[in-house]
Structures are given as structure tokens and as C-alpha cells.
Amino acid sequence: MNTEQNSSDPRIDNDLKTVSYVANNNGLQELTPGSIWDPVHTVNEQAWREIEKQIASSRRKITAGKRSPLHYYMTANQMSADLLARYTHQSRWRVRLHLLPFFFKMMGGKTLKNYADFFKISVEDLQNGRLKPPLYAHHEG
Amino acid sequence: MKDNPDTVHDFPHTQSAHCESGVAANLLSHRGLHFSEAMAFGIGAGLFFGYLPFIRVNGLPLVTYRSAAGTILKRLGRLPGVVIEQKRFRDRKRAMDELDGLLAKGVPVGLQTGVFWLPYFPAALRFHFNAHNLVVYGKEGGDYLISDPVFAGPVRCAAEDLARARFASGALAPRGKMYTLTRVPQHLDRGPHIIKAIDSVCRTMVASRFPLIGIRGIRLLANRVERWPKRLGEDRAALHLGHVVRMQEEIGTGGGGFRFMYAAFLQESAEVLGDDFLRDCSATLTEAGDRWRHFAVMAARVCKKRPRPDDTYTAMATQIRQCASLEENVFRQLGNWLRD
């Protein structure tokens, strides 16, 4: 089954070659090579648009001084305060406080370095609020 | 980690549709017990349905078309003569050292990993999903040589990235889980295991008392889908819908929410057992998979905000109900067949 739409759209998945089960003329299932099915492509794009919306809203909050740069890095990497806390071995409320500019500025060098190493950025980038691309964009050419 | 010499071994990489059954099939075949992916999926009793709205994935209700991560490997490990040794770690360095140790001995190692941390995945597919399985079969320089079953050929991954992927946090955290096949029988009579596995799937699909799983779960999902636009508004409803389609059709499902893969298993089993009845069941399940896909196509048009006049939530719910009826048919018949 196929949809007639969007075959000309650029593929966000780099046109990854996959295999899936497709029934042949005799109705027998065969492992068949192909690309990711178009409807999947559509819903993946939908999911990314949602993430981009969240990133844009995070940027706005940072510019308005309501959130710290850490909020951007957390959102851009699709994390919640809970998940970020687990990755950085801290309590949830500590991370939540660091998302606010007031507490972010009081953060010690060690904590800053912990976050910077985790997001693979420099301490200066984080401290000065330079918003670098998220982790999954680092390897893209 | 870096001073270990290079270890490169042959590992027959076969691309598959689903990571866990693919890894299981590749590891078993590597040890001389040939298994197709579909057979591993079937004997591992991988087919399932669950609609669990109290578990949230990115704020959306969990819909699953397969049994819990790790079930397939667990069931295959129970086959007579098969021994799978599994280990989890607290310490990252120890986890990587033990991996290196096994590779030095020429043992291919299965790992559970978080997709978000694997740089060889296209950026667009790097979500926080922590139950991705792959096989590491060698090390060259600082890179691990990986047979990732959903990719066409072997891939490479830097040691630091693989370490991060093995210790991904969040739901289904792998905690460094690694497993190796330590013993494999020379021959295996598949018949009885096929029957046992089909029985187990039939039970969860039609005889579960829990209303959120199996056929009852599918019907519940249909009812919920019908009410989404009213309860959530158009935008949120479309997000929920897109999420269902992703769980159903995303890379790793083989299409049609694993239904096609299970149909392939039934078809293969028909040959093993010499029973044409299983072939008919396979055809009906293929039909169910086609229905699921039909629903996905409609849903994708709604998510794209380009619906056709008849792409309503009620029409989609009807599609899902038809899937439920078809699947109920298959699994009731299979249940009766088992009792004969």
C-alpha cells in the first residue's frame, strides 16, 4: 500500500534503506528492501515539528529572561528535568532550579562542567548562553 | 579501553525488520542453528497488543504492538540446549572492559542500547528509545564494529558513544545489558516450541481478563480514537494519532504493527508442521495488517492536515474495529486448532 502524496518531499531520514514484510503475488510474506514508508515519514515529521515548536518556545523564554540556557539544551535534546537529572546524577529539584536564570547564575564550576560535558559543549558556551545545536545534530554533515 | 589490540571477527550480518528478533536470529544463525527473523519473533511470542494510557511516552499514551522488550530473547533462552548469559552493570568502565574481553575471545556480544546516543542513526530517528538491540562483533582503533539488524550493512560506533548508549537513562534503561549465547544445540525440533509460542500469543490476544490488552485493548483504542477530537481538540488529537501510527509502523516493526512479521512466522510454521491451516491464518493476519496500514494512511493524511472528506475519526475507529475482528478471528481459530 502506498500514498500518492509527498514522494517529492526531502526525506528527513536520509532515505535510510530498510527491510519490511510485504506479501507477494501469492499472498506470501517476504522480507523486502525499501525505504521508510511514506505515512511513517509524515508522522515522524509531525513529531519533529512538535519538538521544534518546543525549542522555539524555549528560546523565547530564554530571551525574555524567564529560563536559563540550560532549558534550551534540555529541550533541544528532547529531555525532561527528570531525565536530565538522572543523566547528570542530581536530584530533580536541583535541575529544576538550574532551569531558572537566578539559580543558573549561582551554579558552581563543577556543576557547570557536569552539564557542559554531558551536552558536549564548552563551559563558556553554557555560561554565556550560546545556544549550540543539540547532540543528535553533531554528526550530521 | 584504548590499549586493547584490534579484534575483528566475521559475523554474518543479515538485515531484518525488527531489532530484537533480528539480533536473536543473527546470533543463533552465527552459532550454526539457522533461524529466520520471523521464526525468532514467533517462537519468542513477540506479538501483542496493549493500549496503556497511564504510561506516557513524551506525554502521549503508550500503544504497543509487541510484547515487552526482552521477552523474545528470554523465551528463546528457554529453548532446550540454548543458554543465553546476560549481565547488567553499574560501572561504565567495567561494562566496556568486559565487552572488550569477550570480543578479544572472538565472541559476538548482544547489547541493549538507547537509540538517541547512536551517531550512525539518521538524526531524524534519534528519539529516546532505550530498548534497541544490536550485536558488537569486533573493535578497530577506537571504534566498535556493529551489526545493527535494522541497517543494510555493518556500522561503526566510537567507544564513548557506545558507552553512552549502553547507559542511557529513562524508561527501559538498559543499565549496560549485554548478552552472549554460550550454548546452542546442534538440532532443534521446532514443532512443539512453535505450538507453545502460538498458545501463549493466543492467550494474551483473546483470553486476557485485562481490558487494555489483546483484542479488547484494540477495541478500547478504537473507542478512544473516536472521542479524541472532542476530548483533546484537533491539534492534540492529531498528535495522539500520529503517535499511534509511529508505534505501529516505525522502523523496527516490519510494517502493520508486527502483524506481517507474525504472518511470515505462521507461514513458515505451516511448512515446519506440514499443516495448511496455519497458511490460512497467515493470510487472515496479513489482511489484518493491511487494515492497520489502511488506518495509518488515513491517519497520516489527517496529521498532514490534508484529510479527504471520509478521513474522519469515526472512520478510523471503524478501521481499527475491523482489525480487532480479523485478529479475533485468527486467534480464536488458532486456539481451537491447538486444542484439537
Image (cartoon, rainbow, N blue to C red):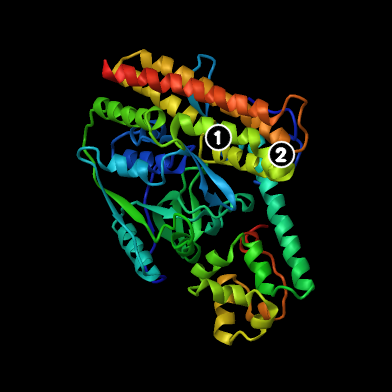
Q: Residue at x 53, y 33 (%)?
A: B220
Report if the CB atoms under discs 2 and 1 are less than 8 Å apart: no
Residue B311 visible, this orientation: yes
Picture coordinates of residue B6 (x, y %)?
39, 62
Residue placed most toward the observer, B30 or B320: B320
Considering the numbered disc 1 on the image, is that residue within a helix, a strand or a loop? helix
Determine the CA span between mark 2 and mark 1. Answer: 18 Å
Q: Quadrant of the N terminus of chain B?
A: bottom left
Q: Nearer the N terminus, badge 2 or badge 1?
A: 1
Picture coordinates of residue A119 (x, y %)?
59, 70
Q: Which of the 4 image quadrants contains residue A97? A: bottom right
The numbered mark 1 sits on a residue in which chain?
B
Residue B209, placed above or below residue B172: above
The amino acid marked with disc number 1 is Leu
Q: Is residue B251 left or right of residue B207?
A: right
The amino acid marked with disc number 2 is Cys
Q: Quadrant of the C terminus of chain B?
A: top left
Residue placed most toward the observer, A40 or B329: B329
Residue A11 visible, this orientation: no
Considering the numbered disc 2 on the image, is that residue within a helix, a strand or a loop? helix
Q: Residue at x 63, y 25 (%)?
A: A1
Instruction: Determine crowd level at label 2: few under 14, some 14-19, many 20+ residues with C-alpha closer than 10 A.
Output: many
Tag 2 residue:
B303
Q: Is residue B277 left or right of residue A62?
A: left
Q: Nearer the viewer, mark 2 or mark 1?
A: 1
Tag 1 residue:
B221
The numbered mark 2 sits on a residue in which chain?
B
Q: Is residue B30 left or right of residue A92?
A: left
Picture coordinates of residue B315 (x, y %)?
66, 25
